[in-house]
Image: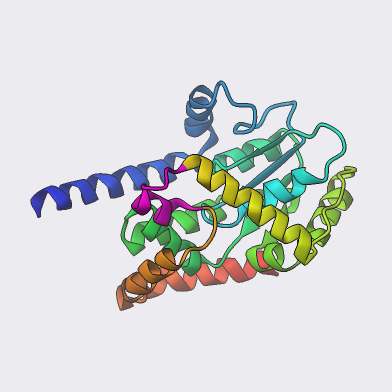
């Protein structure tokens, strides 16, 4: 039992530090540039055409694959750091930037399952990510998770209008959506072995029955009275960006 508590404490400490550091460009960007020095789609630079970011578990994979699937010219997207620092850096560099905003409690539950942490650090991290973007919100195109999953087409149109770009527009039809889900499934199969049941349950980039069951088990922890103030702050911020 002591070993499990120690592992849990270490995991939560790492999570807290990670989501603190990745909110500040001067701290985070040198680290991520070194970590991903061999990847062209993780760190914004002058050759980046579009940054697609969000707090983790907000549909970035779907948005990126759908967007790239219709581009008829070479387009370089940067995505999946889930760091406010990346967004702030992109804005400073005047790179077109899309940020997906998902409801804080949905994100918190997903993070609790994915990272095996408690509710408070997940809510704090969600708040910090989005609060850091308030200073430059007029230089970003925001998209709610609901809009992404319901009709992503107008979002790309807004990007073109806001930044004067000429990205090809993905049409959000049932057929096209199914094709993107299949690509995500293929990506998942490539990342996880068939016998890696626990990791696949927690980390798959699509909903699973097992993950939803874990979320239901953790819901009471997120609804604790001690977290009312955090939940209300997060919900107010979500309404702000949604508007």
Residue at figure coordinates x 53%, y 47% from the top left: 188
Q: Nearer the viewer, residue 186 or 160?
A: 186
- Count of marks, rendered view: 0
Residue 206 in the image: x percent, y percent?
54, 58
Residue placed most toward the observer, 88 or 197 = 197
Residue range highlighted in magenta: 192-204
Residue 97 placed where, x, y %? Answer: 72, 45
Residue for point 62% across, 71% down: 239
Q: Does residue 13 appear left or right of residue 122 in this picture?
A: left
The stretch drawn in magenta includes residue 198: yes
Q: Nearer the viewer, residue 84 or 188?
A: 188
One can see residue 133 in this view = no
- Compared across the picture, whether 184 is left or right of 76 comes to left
Whole-percent x, y for residue 117 in the image: 32, 56
Q: Quadrant of residue 217?
A: bottom left
Magenta segment includes 34 = no
Q: Is residue 63 above or below residue 96?
A: below
Q: The N terminus appears in which quarter of the rendering?
A: bottom left
Give the quadrant of residue 42.
top right
Query: Image point 51% across, 63% down: which residue?
Result: 207
Residue 189 appears at what percent x and percent y? 52, 46
The coloring applied to the image is rainbow
């Amino acid at each position: 039992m002591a070993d499990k508590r120690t592992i849990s404490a270490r995991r939560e400490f790492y999570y807290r530090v990670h989501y603190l550091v990745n909110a500040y460009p001067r701290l985070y960007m040198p680290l991520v540039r070194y970590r991903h020095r061999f990847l062209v789609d993780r760190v914004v630079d002058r050759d980046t055409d579009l940054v697609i970011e969000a707090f983790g578990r907000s549909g970035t994979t779907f948005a990126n694959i759908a967007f790239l699937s219709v581009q008829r010219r070479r387009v370089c997207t940067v995505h999946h750091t889930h760091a406010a620092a990346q967004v702030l850096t992109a804005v400073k560099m005047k790179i077109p930037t899309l940020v997906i905003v998902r409801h804080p409690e949905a994100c918190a539950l997903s993070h609790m399952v994915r990272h095996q942490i408690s509710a408070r650090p997940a809510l704090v991290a969600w708040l910090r990510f989005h609060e850091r973007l308030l200073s430059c919100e007029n230089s970003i195109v925001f998209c709610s998770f609901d809009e992404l999953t319901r009709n992503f087409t107008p979002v790309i149109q807004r990007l073109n209008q806001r930044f004067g770009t000429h990205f090809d527009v993905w049409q959000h039809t049932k057929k096209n959506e199914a094709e993107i889900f299949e690509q995500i499934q293929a990506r998942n199969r490539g990342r996880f072995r068939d016998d890696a049941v626990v990791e696949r349950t927690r980390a798959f980039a699509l909903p699973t029955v097992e993950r939803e069951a874990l979320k239901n088990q953790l819901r009471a922890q997120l609804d604790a009275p001690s977290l009312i103030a955090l939940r209300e702050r997060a919900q107010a911020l979500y309404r702000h960006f949604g508007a």
